[in-house]
Structure formats: structure tokens, C-alpha cells
Amino acid sequence: MEIIGARLYQYNLPLAWPLPLKGTKLNARQGLVLELKVNDDGFGVGYLYGEAAPLPDFSSESLDEARQQLGALMSSLLGQQVDPESFNSQEWCGQPVYPSVAFALESAISLPAILADDPETELPVAPLLTGSTADMLQCIDDWSSCWPAAFKLKVARGELKSDIYRTRQLLDALPETVCLKLDANRRWSVEQAVKFVDHIDPARIAYIEEPVNNASGSFIASQQAFYKATKMPFAWDETLQNPEFEFAPQSGLAALVIKPTLVGGIRRCESLVNAGRDAGVHCVVSSSFESVLGVNTLSALARVWTPREAAGLDTLNAFKHHLFDDSVALWQRLPDHVLQQMELL
Ligand SMILES: [Mg+2]
């Protein structure tokens, strides 16, 4: 497949409510949409899209840095042949590529291969419980469809006592067959995390994502101390975003939460999925508040890589409106009214 043209657009989409991040609240989401015009031996001339949307507070790179690097890489790709099955942005570039940029480039170029493998089956879900405790209990009370295997709940955002109380209330309200997947975003000390687990029925917790901070020297050391004390299964999310991270099986490691915008491109994520699968560790493909364009690609990746796993992709309701509502067929150019919503860079 030859790259015969490339354009970069920037979107600015208002959010439905201010989104709390680590230090800021986001009122609008900005990101970049890469448009590649390609000539494929089988399909002729067509268009492919990828999204680079660094998430403030979470991504290592800023939007400006992503834009500059993506611009340079786009120029280097013009007139070149690339393989949708194996294109690797790091290898192409010969130096580190920002995770969001790697995701944009590799998902655009790999899209024909990804969609060719897409079984288009429905993914299981693990709905996120949000709002006040009363909102969460109401959501459980109103639940009318089939119960999922697990709901997801953020913890460690306030006092430990209220986390324990809320978690117990929710577990009491849920059918006994339903578990919680907790996410502490590295906010607890080992002592706090151990105390939390002491007050919760461990059989109802599938795992806790990144339970502990690195006060004991390193995240891995804290994690090991936590697991030794509790035997509570845990999952990695932020840990995978360290570019130096290399997968090795570990006692208690139940899942890898893989966010391609934050972890890097398709190739790196694919290697994590394969390593996790070989070690019997669950892999959960998750979004980072990308637009519908990025989330569509992530959904296809989740169906291809982890079809029986509940993916973490329910972030689109954070947007006031979407770039587009109808899906756009492979090789087709995005309609004019979609492109006109964005700034051509
Ligand atoms: Mg997480």
C-alpha cells in the first residue's frame, strides 16, 4: 500500500460535563485526526484515518508535541510503501514515537488488516458506576437488562471509610453473582489498600486496578507488598504506560488494562495482549476519551484481540456531540460536514 497524500485535522469537542482529571477539569476534548490517502493494490485509491488525542494529566506528550511529531512523520511517509499487517511507527521513525502518535499512525495504516479480522460480534461490558453513591444505587435499582459479570468502580478518591462503606453498599445491592472491578489509580498507600481489603468480601472483587502508590520506593515493590498482605488480585494500567515496561508474569496479576492512546501503537499493545494471553492474564482494551473515530478503532481491536473480555470503552457519553454518528466505511473519505467541523492544519 502506497501513501499518496496526508492531511492533519484538529478537533475541539465540547464535553457533556466538566471531566475531572488528576489536576484539572476538562471542558472540551481536543485531538488530531490523521487522514491518509493511499493506493492499495487490491482496493485502489482510498482514505484511512487515525486519531492522536493526548489526554492532559495522563499522556506524556502535549497536543502541540503530538502535532509536530505527527507532521514530520506524515511527510516522511509520503510516496512510501507500507504494510498494513506489520507497520511499526517506532521502527519507521528510528526513535521513540509518542504513544498517541504511534496509535494514530499505526491504527490508520493497520485499519484494513484490523477490519478484515473484525468478527463484528458484540463485546461483553463492565459498566462504570458514576456519580454519588445514591446515583450508583439508583442505577443498580433501575437495572433492567441482563446483569454483567462485573461493574467498574473508581475508589481512593476520598476518605477510606467512605470507600469501604460505598463499596459494601453497592455489593449488597448487586446480585451475589455480580462482582466489582475496582480502580484506585495508585492513590492508596499499602496500609490503606490493605485496610480497605480487610473490610470487603474478596470473593466479590474481580481485581483492583493499580491499588497502591510508590511510597515504598517503587510501584512494583508496593504492589508486591500489597499482594503479599491481602492475596487480592490486581491489574495494571498506569504501569503499562511506562515505555520501559516489559511484561513478566507475577503472582496476583489478574489483568492488563491496555489503553493504546497512552501505551503506544497497535504493535506494542498487540505484543502486550499476546504476552498477557500466554500467561493466562486477562487483557482489557480501554479508551482514553478519544472521539468516536478513535473509539470505533478501539472497539474493532477489542473484538479482534479480546472478543470475550469486557472492554473499557464507555467514554463516548462524556461528549456533548460526536464528530459523526453513522459509521464510515473503510477506504471512504469522511463526509465534508465532518471534515468541516475540524481545523485543517
Ligand atoms: Mg485505570
Image (tube, rainbow, N blue to C red):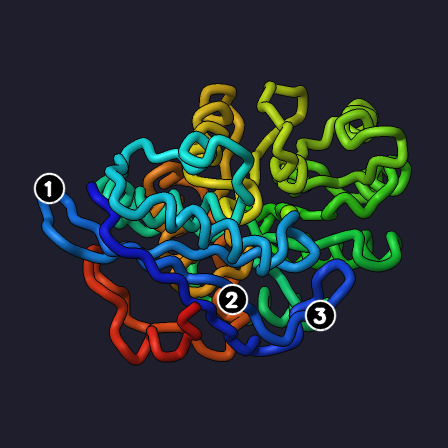
Going from the N terminus, do you reach mark 3 or mark 2 first? 3
| 304 with respect to 311 (left or right) | left
Disc 2 packing (10 Å; few <14; some 14–19; many ≥20): few
Image quadrant occupied by the N terminus: top left
Going from the N terminus, do you reach mark 1 or mark 3 first? 3
Instruction: Report the mark closest to the observer, 3 or 2.
Output: 3
Q: Mark 1 points at which residue?
A: 41
Residue 170 % position (x, y): 69, 58
Count of numbered badges drawn on the protein: 3
Residue type at mark 3? Lys
Q: Mark 3 points at which residue?
A: 25
Q: What element carries label 2?
A: loop
The Cα–Cα distance between marks 2 and 1, rounded to whole angstroms, is: 50 Å
Residue type at mark 2? Trp
Residue drawn at 25 percent across, 47 percent down:
3
| 219 with respect to 189 (left or right) | left
Residue drawn at 31 percent across, 45 percent down:
109
Instruction: Report the mark closest to the observer, 1 or 3.
Output: 1
| 282 with respect to 17 (left or right) | left
Contact? badges 3 and 2 (CB < 8 Å): no
Cβ of mark 3 under 8 Å from ligand 1: the answer is no
**Residue 143's disc number:** 2
Image quadrant occupied by the C terminus: bottom left
Residue drawn at 58 percent across, 69 percent down:
139
Residue 84 % position (x, y): 27, 38
Going from the N terminus, do you reach mark 2 or mark 1 first? 1
